[in-house]
Amino acid sequence: MGQKCHPYGFRVGITRDWRSRWYANKQEYGKYLVEDQKIRKLIQKLLGAIGNTAAANAGVADVEIERTKSEVRIVIHTARPGVVIGRKGSAIDELRAQVERLAAPKKVTVNIKEITQPEQQAQLVAIGIAEQIARRSNFRRAVKRAIETSLAAGVQGIRIQCSGRLGGSELARVYSAAYGKLPLGTLTADIDYGFAEAPTVYGNIGIKTWIYRGAIPRERTNHGADAQAR
């Protein structure tokens, strides 16, 4: 059996914070958990469609959810805030209205956080490659271009893996390319992970991306903060 670990879950509580932040009792926990998943899927459907001309890709890298007794706060990390907000705020108003139907009777607040360096965000790099493959671009060229762009943006290491019927081949296969350092076993390493799927006539192509952005100083980790407090 392969001993694999998710790069984000491996670091939660040490160098990464939870993407959903709230407290609930046993009766409400399951309801909130399912509700969070529905909210994320709704945002992905409205803002992150790949290969769908009806919905523009807004470059959403992450969605954070915070809950209080009377409010649900959503923070959308995006490289294209204009697409999320829409003309005169129409798009974000529609998004808020649909989320309120899921989270009723609680009030919903949606905040937008702009990503200034999308080339350093693994999720956005994976989405970019998926868009190119969905447009029938050569997957090797798309991966090579993404690696060169990310390295030019200052990342220290990157790995991209594509899986599926690449190039319309009869059998599914895996293509992987990497450059630089990628210390996946180091907890203080700033490793960003992203996954996207590209719909093609041959089936879906999965793209996984790992990006190493450098070491995180110990004082910025939870362990370092605890040591300073003592």
Image (tube, helix red, strand yellow):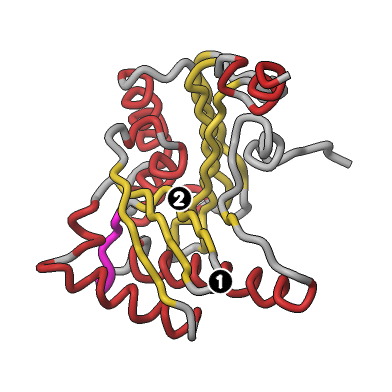
Secondary structure at badge 1 equals loop
Measured from the top left, where is residue 3 in percent x and y? 83, 37
Reading the image, the residue beneath label 2 is 62
Reading the image, the residue beneath label 1 is 69
129 on left or right of 186: left
Badge 1 crowding class, 10 Å Cα cut-off, few under 14, some 14 to 19, many 20 or more, is: few
Give the residue at the far front of this rendering: 230
Which quarter shows the N terminus?
A: top right
Q: Residue at (58%, 47%) from the top-left corner?
A: 163
Q: Amino acid at mark 2?
A: Asp
Part of the protein shown in magenta:
53-58
Where, by quadrant of the figure, is residue 99 drawn? bottom left
- Closer to the camera, 74 or 43? 74
Magenta segment's dominant SS is loop
Q: Tell whether position 54 is magenta.
A: yes
Closer mark to the observer between disc 1 and disc 2: 1
116 on left or right of 20: left
Mark 1 and mark 2 lie on one chain; the one further toward the N terminus is 2
